[in-house]
Amino acid sequence: MASKIFHGDISPSDFANALVSRFNQNNYTTKVISNDKQVFVQITTSNYRSSGGHTSLTVSLTPVEDGVSIDVSKQNLFGVVASLGQTAISTLLNPVNLITRLDDLAQDIESIQLSDEIWMVIQQTARGFNASHQLSDRLRRLVCGYCGTANIVGESRCIACGAPLGDEQPTTCRFCGYVIHTIDKICPNCGKNL
Ligand SMILES: [Zn+2]
Ligand SMILES: [Zn+2]
């Protein structure tokens, strides 16, 4: 799944705190790993199947220019752990030889449900911080290439010198929040038609 970008005055740890406080109870356990920039929250179901294992998803929170880029995935925790130079967390390993195809399917369904719940918490958190897929005020400026004046996005000509500002106006994909240009037809992040 493509990452989603939330623009506004919000940091990776704001999302991480919300996810931990929502999921670190009853049926889930959470683990947070971070380096100086990114924060990773791994959420695992705690009901252990007789012949299966836990369902586990990792939320990657990466700061971008005016917000946070978020990715939810099944696989990347080991990559994350490796790249951060930490030892693998053995409790995450499923006893693969015991998992039947049926349990795989059950786990897929469980992980889709977990993924939906995670995105719900992310959306709620973003709303609480007034962050959205729209450009924040900080990025709603387009600097004129001729005189350096900051213009409001959407102006066709520079308010100071009258130079054309062209089609390079930044905007965002309404599906994922990725910063694109008005001339783009397809979002380079999520691939949807704009
Ligand atoms: Zn100008
Ligand atoms: Zn997109």
Image (spheres, rainbow, N blue to C red):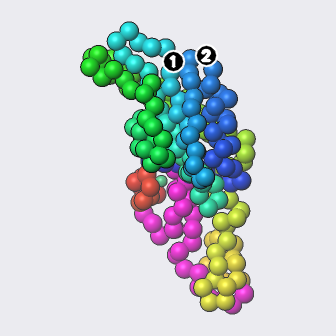
Left or right side of 75 for 27:
right
Whether residue 176 is visible here, answered yes or no, is yes
| Residue type beneath disc 1 | Ser
Whether residue 73 is visible here, answered yes or no, is no
Which residue is painted at 66% across and 44% down in the image?
A: 13
Which residue is painted at 57% across and 29% down in the image?
A: 30
Residue at which label 2 appears:
26
Q: Nearer the viewer, residue 143 or 41?
A: 41
Left or right side of 192 for 44:
right
The mark that comes first in sequence, 2 or 1, is: 2
Mark seen at residue 46: 1
Circle 1 residues within 10 Å: few <14, some 14–19, many ≥20: some
Q: Is residue 134 magenta?
A: no
Task: Report the span colored magenta.
Answer: 160-185
Q: Is residue 179 magenta?
A: yes
Spot occupied by residue 129 in the image (x, y as percentages of width and height):
73, 45
User: Cβ–Cβ below 8 Å for labels 2 and 1?
Assistant: yes
Above or below, 20 against 70 in this view is: above
Which residue is painted at 72% across and 87% down in the image?
A: 160
Circle 2 residues within 10 Å: few <14, some 14–19, many ≥20: few
Q: CA distance from mark 2 to mark 1?
A: 8 Å
| Residue type beneath disc 2 | Asn
Above or below, 160 against 59 in this view is: below
Spot occupied by residue 6 in the image (x, y as percentages of width and height):
61, 50
Q: Quadrant of residue 126?
A: top right
Above or below, 161 against 45 in this view is: below
Which residue is painted at 49% across and 36% down in the image?
A: 58
